[in-house]
Amino acid sequence: MATKPSKFNTFTFFKLPSAWWCGVRLKSIDEKKAVTTVKHKWLNQNPFKSMFWAVQGMAAELSTGAMVISQIQQSGKKISMLVANNNASFTKKATGRITFTCEDGHLIENAIKKTIATGEGQTFWMKSVGVNADGVMVSTFNFEWTIRLKK
């Protein structure tokens, strides 16, 4: 899988279809930062006419996980990845287009190096912040990623 957003979005169609059908899209990615968006619409709303929290979670997780996938590929090693824990806070109704940004890519490289060097699993927390079109924060998600060398 390439780390170009268009290729990654094709990947989500086949491997994460619920996220794709809800409108979650990767907009940009590099080693330090990834940006995803999702637009509030009938398909992904809750009974209160705002975006369902789980849809926000899919977009937030993708902004962290896309960088993990990308850096694992760059390592050339077979490394498994899994979310072990997460938490979230919601500060405003999510309507319109919500943009999630994660700037914690720098945490991944060290964890990959350690798991390759020691053969032991590593964990690290990554944060993704969602803002609406006005730049107002609507939610913050934290994901504890675990990685380990496959045997």
Image (cartoon, grey):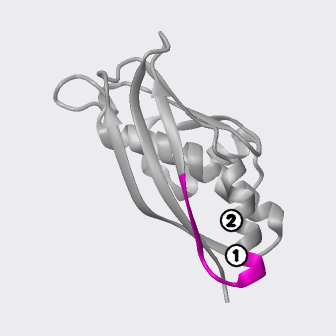
Q: Give 123 or 8, whichever is nearer the viewer.
A: 123
Magenta highlight on residue 122: yes
Position in image of residue 12 (x %, y %): 57, 50
Magenta highlight on residue 19: no
Tell me where the magenta segment starts and ends, as one range.
115-125
Question: Is 93 on the left or on the right of 65, as rendered?
Answer: left
Which residue appears farthest toward the top when viewing the image? 134
Q: Amino acid at mark 1?
A: Thr
Tell me if mark 1 has few (under 14), some (14-19) or many (20+) residues whose alpha carbon lies within 10 angstroms of its own.
some
Q: Quadrant of residue 28?
A: top right
Position in image of residue 59 (x %, y %): 48, 40
Q: Amino acid at mark 2?
A: Ala
Contact (Cβ within 8 Å) of mark 2 with mark 1: yes
Residue 4 seen from this side: yes
Spatial separation of the CA atoms under disc 2 and disc 1: 6 Å
Q: Which corner quadrant holds the C terminus?
A: bottom right
Identify the residue shown where x is 75% and y is 48%.
Answer: 3
Q: Quadrant of residue 9?
A: top right
Which residue appears farthest toward the bottom when viewing the image? 151
Position in image of residue 13 (x %, y %): 56, 49
For disc 1, the marked residue is 115
For disc 2, the marked residue is 111
Q: Which corner quadrant holds the N terminus?
A: bottom right
Question: Is 127 on the left or on the right of 93, as rendered?
Answer: right
Tell me if mark 2 has few (under 14), some (14-19) or many (20+) residues whose alpha carbon lies within 10 angstroms of its own.
some
Q: Quadrant of residue 137?
A: top left
Q: Give 113 or 40, whichever is nearer the viewer.
A: 113
Question: Is 48 on the left or on the right of 35, as rendered?
Answer: left
Question: Is 90 on the left or on the right of 122, as rendered?
Answer: left
Q: What number of labels is visible?
A: 2
